[in-house]
Image (spheres, grey):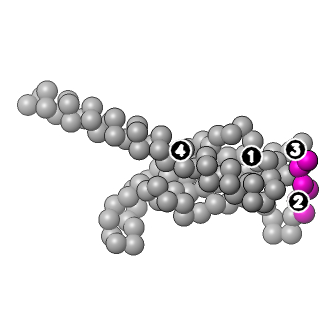
Amino acid sequence: MLELLSLLLLLLVGWWWFDSLRAREIAVREARVACEAENLQFLDDTVGISNVKLIRNEQGRLIWQRSYDFEFSTTGNNRHRGSIVLQAHHVSLINLGLPPNTHLHLIP
């Protein structure tokens, strides 16, 4: 019985690891696309996890909500922090964190 529980726990950890990698890949891709759409430079080509929690989706099912932070530049000489929120593997929010009237400089 203990072996079965250990195996189940190991499978659960493996699933969590694989699911988290997939979610991170989606977050990186979507952050890059959002930056490109706004003529921003996506820095470090990565995102960092900032929050994970269980939430209920519109159908009432429990799903994972993961929040990631990333950095981008408007000029090539500065750093700004943005964030992206995934619910399951779907983007629910991308925040570039710029004030509404910020003048963006195009990066050559």
Q: Is mark 2 in CB contact (under 8 Å) with mark 4?
A: no
Q: Amino acid at mark 3?
A: Gly
The residue at 47%/44% (across/down) is 22
Which residues, given as a range, are shown in magenta? 103-108
* Amino acid at circle 1: Phe
Residue bearing mark 2: 104
Give x and y (percent) for residue 16: 37, 41
Mark 2 element type:
loop
Find the residue positioned furthest to the left.
Answer: 1
Q: Residue at x 39, y 72 (%)?
A: 58
> Residue 48 lies in magenta, yes or no?
no
C-alpha gap between disc 3 and disc 1: 10 Å
| Residue 106 colored in magenta in the image | yes
Disc 2 marks which amino acid? Leu
Residue at 60 percent of width and 42 percent of height? 48
Give the numbered dot on residue 76: 3
Residue 58 as seen in the image, left or right of residue 94? left
The kind of secondary structure element at disc 4 is helix
Give the CA distance from mark 4 to mark 3.
25 Å
